[in-house]
Amino acid sequence: MSTIDYTKNEVFVEGNRTLKQIDDVIIAPLDRIPNLKFFIALGFTLTLLLIGTVAIGLSFYYGTGLWGNNNPVGWAWPIVNFVFWVGIGHAGTLISAILFLLRQKWRNGIARFAEAMTIFAVITALIFPIIHTGRPWVAAVYLLPYPNQHSLWVNFNSPLLWDVFAVSTYFTVSLVFWYVGLIPDFAVLRDRATGKAKKVIYSIFSLGWRFSNRHWQHYEMTYLILAGLATPLVLSVHTIVSFDFAVSILPGWHTTIFPPYFVAGAIFSGFAMVQNSLVVIRNVFDMQDLIPLNTLETMNKIILLTGTMVGYAYSMEFFIAWYSGSQPEYFTFVNRAFGPYSWAYWIMFSCNVFIPQLFWIKKIRRSIPLMFIIAIFVNIGMWFERFVITVTSLSRDYLPSSWGYYSPTITDIAILLGSFGLFFTLTLLFTRFLPSIAIAEIKAVSEGAQPTHHGEDHE
Amino acid sequence: MSNQQVDMNNLKKEIPKGIFIKGLILLVIGIAAAVFAYQIDPLRASFNNIIALLLVVSVGMGAIFLVALEHIVGAVWSVPFRRIAEHQSFIFLATPLLAIPIILNMHDIYHWTHLDAVLADPILYQKSPYLNEPFFIWRSVGIFVIMSLFMFMFYRNSRKQDETKSQKTSKFNAVLSAPFMMLFAISITMVAVDYAMSLEPHWFSTIFGVYYFAGTFATAISVLTLLVLRLKSNGNLVSKINGNHYYSLGGLMFAFTAFWMYMAFSQYMLIWYANIPEETFWFLPRMEHGWEYMSIALIFIKFIIPFGLLLNRNSKMNPSRLKVAAYWIIGAHIYDMYWLVMPTYNHASGTHGPVFGWIEVGFVALSAGIIMVVYYLAANKKNHLPIGDPKLQRGLDFHL
Amino acid sequence: MSKLYSIAALFDTPNSIMDAAAKVQDAGYENYDVNTPYPVHGMDDQMKLRPSKMGYYTITIGLTFMSLMLFFMYWVYNIDYPQVIGGKPLFPLPAFVPIMFEATVLTGAVLTVAIMIIFYFKFPNNSHPLHDSDYMKAVSSDKFGICIEATDPKFDINAVKDFLKSIGATQIDEIYFDEEEVNHKNKVLEPKFVIGLILIAGFTSLSVYLHMNKLLYIPPFDWMMVQHKVTAQDHSDFFENGISSRQPVEGTVARGFMPYLYVDDIEGASENLQNPYPATAENIELGKRKYLTYCSPCHGDLGKGDSRLKGQFPNGPTIHSDKIVDWTDGRLYHVITEGQNVMPGYKKTVTRKERWSIVNYVRTLQRALDAKVEDMQ
């Protein structure tokens, strides 16, 4: 399909299936023993996870001295990783909520999967602030406002506390959204299940869903409301993450464009990660026609769009740093581009702004290996963006006598690898144990699923 | 399908004369008021002129953006409205009318045009490679030329497609809108920085361009909505345009109302929290001498009230309620521009507190007149639907 | 024979179910339902359902909790524990906005879903008669069904069957209540359940006990107690004398410490010591506070020797006797510092400044109770 026919709707689920066949295809991975590719992939991700677990265990035993964080760079890889993973989560909500509100039908095939990735990304992200508290088992004691014998309250003025509220709200609402979407699918699974154990489990999770239209009516309204709530929520989360930096007075951190810029970057990296995962998953589980090339191409367009938005923010920051006439501000940006961390800055700039521009070319947008590589570059670039923001500003701030150069340790690297391991392990297991495509949603948009002669103008 | 096509060719092309007559009256009043105002109080007149310019740029340049946005994302529901937006984008051509008086009066308005002040002030001196008169004028001319060029290209392609019905044109438009998007982003940022932000040349905010863009989008889509509703009731559009389409228009108005609040809050919050004098001084005049009430009212006028007006699903489907919301949003944008520009007038003229009188009304009337008259001249006796667009039928069939 | 729940009919296409639903509605049935594998657009209109009101719950709940959260933060910062943080006012509204927003979204989303599931759907409910029927299995996959319940006022088994057949049903089933499921009662006192509870309780207690009393004392979990560092007054082999910290250099004096030179020398004190603190209102006020705390129990509130202790401890003498009035400030200070007879010394509990302030206050008392004419002027 090289030219677009503007008179027809684009097809986002290939193969004209009956409703029954949709069930069969989507549920197939749950019923059969996965192939060798799955176990190789799982083995790989579990290895990464093990590396990370060992590194975190060592950090607990010996303390955070194992990490590279030190004066003047007190915030380093842990927050970089946190912001990176929270950002990854944003694509999922964007696909499931914002594109739902915009009625983009191509989202239906990947929405469930993207939502799951949101949840896993947030879980992965939450590891970093929690291990940072030093004693994660009492983290709640520091972070949540509850009446206590010291009659002390948490600091509602602090962006770090807003983060606690934002990320936990985000996690909860995403989980609820995901589960609400899963209820009808659990009912489908329940009615197909043959084994007793499976039937009991699916019955419990389906809550007794009966596909009643009197239920569908409220269900659809609630789904719309959840999408409506999740949309500002997803913007608020990365906005608040950006406040962590932007409410300070550190040059390079304090700039008013940070909230939308962080959100655009989050969606950018999130789409790259979802695209990467989809490419892997459709290969491992042979779902080439459920996740068609058209969907991936559309995602690449969004990567291009958000990449350009990020480019706008970079340029605007640089311009205003000069325009402001504020010496420290301008110095910080020159220092980013030409100082000791210029290597990181140019990795960031080229991966985020230049390389995605290749997606202007249709051939590249539709080539699986090329888009995979570009998306990996985008993820590298976005990780480096957080690195550049966090580390360059801290390493050289107002006081030249306390400038320093930050380098990560092997533990930092191992924890980062472990976070990838955790994320992809959860993703693989999810695809194996839950329907990774929303059955009811796909059925509703498949060919001939909606009545033809009952429009509003009919009455 | 075929009888729909026949319908379209025979659609009424004359748009209500009322738009023209009312517009002309407003325009005459506006021009008279503007000329008179420039005679008796040129300083206040020129500040009001900026408000009028920012408003007309929002409506016109915003419309070009709406057209390009539809091309680039391949939107379907908005196809029936594209021609109206294209006619609306002609309003952009009238911007020199408002920009030239500002440029002629630059010395009164912009502190950085005074060479002695720039030399005495190291910060202004540092900015002078950007903030200087020739470059300012060239930027304005450049923005005008480039944006008009794109506007004509989109319009010409669209008209040509009425005859050829070629799919290639759609594709070409999509390709064309990609560079447009980048140039638009730069242009609207420059408009915001040059005409509004540089009123206080020491102040800076990276989000300012996006802030202005948020209001621009909401205003452009509101004007478009009003035009659609007017033309629909006049019988210029097919009857298939219904609540589903209105819902989408209303949804965008709603979304960008919220988006504006998000931008405004981000800007205020970060400056308030960091509390650095080089940034806070911009907000301080907006918090004294009566401006504090104006600032609080801004939150209600530009966010809470339109948000409430559009929250309900029915209010987006119902034409009369949508109309109220659209007028409200346009009014709110004017208020927002007033809030952006006029505190500097206080500073420049040594007055205190918000000023309001016939000059303010006159300039708003002027811009309203320009919008209505230009639209009438551009749109009368033309097709109001892009009848050659291959997506049109899908657009008309659009269902939530 | 179990009770009839409903007559269920299957249809094959979305168009036929739309027509059928409209006809069932028109025929005047009330207790019926349409079951479809996915929401069919326009079905709500066919069934004449009123629009869903879920949105009103969301907005009410969201706004309520937003206000509550705002009030809570106001209460914390302004009433319960006022505290200035980061130079922000006590009611920093912009800083509250993020949390208010999150509270709105969190409660709005979670409670709306909870209300829908619990009150509208009456879920979880896995004992509904439709479950496990062939009808349910068909509508969960690719068929569209209508089911008219036996409780409907117009219900008549044969009429309903004929009616459904006449509107084009491809298959018609009778759905019965499953007696076992309907009559099933959860028996709380069932032995299995009780034993299970006891086992859980036992296991929980045991694991908490082991955790708190054993596990925390086993390496490496004892790391909070056993730390590789030297604590004060600990034994250490590092230094020759075996103590963990070094002795200060001979003659070292703590910061702010002023040695008292007249420990056993009351005459020296009374001759040489001068009160360094003038009798200002502030110092007298301080002296009064300390006097009332430390001196008044024995000497009385006004120093008249009227002890509050009612003989539980020897009464202190009055401080208004000529003997004490004639004492120098230095002597008074010495007595307060070192004590006299049964009176203990107060140098450990009352600071130097406070002791001198007490002297000032005693002088004030003496003068107040024995005022002269010139004091009144």
Image (tube, rainbow, N blue to C red):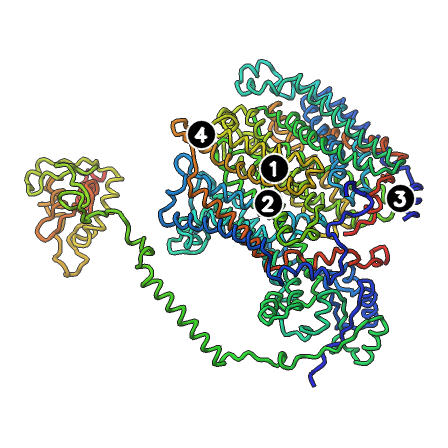
Please name the residue that numbered disc 2 is placed on.
Answer: A273
| Closer to the camera in the image, A386 or B274 | A386
Q: Between tags 1 and 2, which lies in front? A: 2
Q: Between tags 4 and 3, which lies in front? A: 4
Q: In this view, does C188 lie to the left or right of C165?
A: left
Q: Are marks 1 and 3 on the same chain?
A: yes
- Say if mark 1 contacts mark 3, CB within 8 Å: no
Horizontal and vertical percent for residue C213?
32, 63
Q: Do labels 1 and 4 share a chain?
A: no
Q: How many labels does the image show?
A: 4
Please name the residue that numbered disc 3 is placed on.
Answer: B235
Q: Between tags 2 and 3, which lies in front? A: 2
Q: Are marks 2 and 3 on the same chain?
A: no
Q: Between tags 4 and 2, which lies in front? A: 2
The subunit carrying tag 4 is A
Query: Separation of disc 1 and disc 2 at Cα?
Result: 42 Å
